[in-house]
Image (cartoon, rainbow, N blue to C red):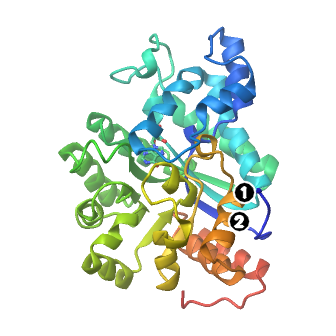
C-alpha cells in the first residue's frame, strides 16, 4: 500500500522501539567505520534482510535484531546518532510528541551480564547508553522542534536487569526518561518473574509511569497480570484481551490505554492478516482508549503514515477517529501533568476542536 498521508495533522506516538527504528543507511555507515562485515553489501539488500515480509511469529521477528544490534551497541557516537536521527524521522512523519523505548542493557558493552551480541567488553555501560540517548533525543528536539521522551525496557528473559532499569528511570527522570516497560518474548516466558515484579513495585513506589507488553501473542491472563500485579497504566498491544470478555469489559470501564501497532500485529502473527476484523476495529467500535503506533518501523518497513493509511483504507478509520485517538494518546502519555495539558491543548487547537474532557 502506498505510504500516502491520510491524516496530515500533528500526531502523538507512544509505542515505538528505538532499536527497531534505526536507519539502514546508518547501520551500514557505522559498520563500515567500525570494520564490521555485514551479511549484505548494499543498503537495499540489507533492508531486504532485516524487513519482515510475510506474517510470522514474535519469536522469529525478534531474531531480526541480531542482524544489526552489534553494529550500534557499544559505540558512543552511533548510539547518540540513532537517537538524534529518530527524532528527525518522527518530525518528518508529523509527530509532535513521541515516547521512544529501548533496553539500555542491549546497547551496552560493560556493566551488563551477559554482554549482549557477542561483543568484547568495552566502556559503554547501560547508564552511559541512557545518557547518550538522552543527548541525541534532546539535540533532535532542539533541531526538529518536536518533543521526545524515553521509556526504559526491562526484558522478559533478563529479570536480573530489571532492578537496574528502574534505578535508571529514577535517576534520569528529570532528563527525559518518563516510564518503564517490560518487553521481549511473552510467548516463551510467561508469568512475570519476581525480579520484574520487584522492579515494578519500586516504580510504583517512586511514581514512575508503567507500561507492559502483554496480550500481544500471550494469553489474556498476561494482560490481567500486567494490570493487577505490575500496576501497568498502559498495555503494549493487548489484542488478546478480547478473548476474555469479562477482562475486556473491566479494562474498558477502567479506560485502560492500549498501545496498538497495526502493521506489527499482522507481521508478528499476533493478529490475523485480515485488517477488517482486527481487534482495533472492536476498540474503535467500543470507543476504547488506545493509540496507533509503529512499534518497530525498521523491521516492519512502516511509518506513522503507513499505519494511518492502513487504518483508513482497510479498517474504516476516519478523520474524527484519528483525532480522537491522538487526543487520547496525549491524555495518556507519561509527561508531567502540566506538559500533558499543554500537549492536549495544542492538538485540540490544531484539530480545530473545542477542548473536551469527555474522551
Ligand atoms: O513487538 C514487540 N514485542 C515484544 N518485544 C519487542 C517488540 N518489539 C521490540 N521488542 C523488544 O524490545 C527490545 C527493546 O526495544 C527490543 O530489542 C526487542 O527485543
Q: Which residue is mark 2?
A: 309
Residue 303 drawn above or below residue 234: above
> Which of the two residues, 181 or 59, is positioned nearer the viewer here?
59
Distance in Å between CA atoms under marks 1 and 2: 8 Å
Sequence-first tag of 1 and 2: 1
Q: Report x, y in % for residue 37.
A: 62, 10
Q: Are marks 1 and 2 in contact (CB under 8 Å)?
A: yes
Q: Report x, y in % for residue 143.
A: 81, 47
Q: At x 25% / y 43%, what residue is drawn?
A: 189
Residue 341 can be seen in this image: no
From the viewer's perspective, is 120 left or right of 243? right
Q: Quadrant of residue 345?
A: bottom right
Q: At x 53% / y 31%, what residue is drawn?
A: 129
Q: Report x, y in % for residue 335.
A: 55, 64
> Which of the two residues, 212 or 199, is positioned nearer the viewer here?
212
Q: Quadrant of residue 49?
A: top right
Secondary structure, mark 1, is: loop
Local packing at callout 2 (Cα closer than 10 Å; few below 14, some 14-19, many 20+) is many
Residue 237 can be seen in this image: yes
Q: At x 29% / y 53%, what residue is drawn?
A: 200
Q: Which residue is mark 1?
A: 1
Q: Quadrant of the N terminus?
A: bottom right
Q: Is mark 2 within 8 Å of ligand 1?
A: no
Amino acid at each position: 500500500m502506498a505510504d500516502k498521508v491520510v491524516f496530515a495533522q500533528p500526531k502523538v506516538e507512544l509505542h515505538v522501539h528505538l532499536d527497531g527504528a534505526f536507519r539502514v543507511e546508518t547501520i551500514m555507515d557505522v559498520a563500515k567505520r567500525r570494520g564490521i562485515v555485514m551479511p549484505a553489501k548494499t543498503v537495499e539488500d540489507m533492508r531486504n534482510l532485516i524487513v519482515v515480509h510475510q506474517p510470522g511469529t514474535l519469536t522469529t521477528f525478534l531474531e531480526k535484531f541480531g542482524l544489526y544490534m552489534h553494529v550500534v551497541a557499544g559505540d558512543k557516537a552511533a548510539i547518540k546518532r540513532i537517537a538524534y536521527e529518530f527524532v528527525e524521522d518522527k518530525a518528518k512523519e508529523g509527530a509532535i510528541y513521541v515516547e521512544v523505548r529501548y533496553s539500555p542493557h542491549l546497547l551496552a558493552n560493560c556493566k551488563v551480564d551477559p554482554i549482549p551480541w557477542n561483543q568484547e567488553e568495552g566502556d559503554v555501560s547501560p547508564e552511559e547508553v541512557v545518557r547518550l540517548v538522552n543527548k541525541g533525543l534532546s539535540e533532535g528536539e532542539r533541531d526538529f522542534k518536536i518533543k521526545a521522551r524515553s521509556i526504559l525496557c526491562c526484558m522478559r528473559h533478563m529479570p536480573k536487569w530489571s532492578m537496574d532499569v528502574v534505578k535508571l528511570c529514577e535517576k534520569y527522570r528529570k532528563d527525559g526518561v518518563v516510564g518503564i516497560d517490560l518487553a521481549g518474548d511473552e510467548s516463551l516466558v510467561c508469568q512475570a518473574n519476581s525480579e520484574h515484579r520487584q522492579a515494578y513495585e519500586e516504580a510504583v513506589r517512586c511514581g514512575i509511569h508503567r507500561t507492559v507488553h502483554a496480550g500481544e501473542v500471550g494469553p489474556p491472563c498476561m494482560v490481567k497480570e500486567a494490570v493487577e500485579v505490575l500496576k501497568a497504566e498502559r498495555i503494549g498491544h493487548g489484542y488478546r484481551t478480547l478473548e476474555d470478555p469479562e477482562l475486556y469489559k473491566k479494562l474498558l470501564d477502567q479506560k485502560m490505554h492500549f498501545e496498538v501497532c497495526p502493521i506489527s500485529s499482522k507481521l508478528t502473527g499476533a493478529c490475523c492478516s485480515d485488517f477488517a476484523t482486527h481487534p482495533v476495529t472492536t476498540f474503535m467500535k467500543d470507543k476504547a482508549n488506545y493509540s496507533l503506533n509503529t512499534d518497530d518501523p525498521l523491521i516492519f518497513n512502516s511509518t506513522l503514515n503507513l499505519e494511518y493509511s492502513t487504518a483508513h483504507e482497510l479498517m474504516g478509520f476516519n478523520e474524527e477517529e484519528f483525532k480522537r485517538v491522538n487526543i487520547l494518546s496525549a491524555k495518556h502519555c507519561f509527561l508531567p501533568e502540566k506538559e500533558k495539558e499543554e500537549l492536549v491543548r495544542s492538538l485540540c487547537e490544531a484539530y480545530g476542536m473545542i477542548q473536551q474532557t469527555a474522551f
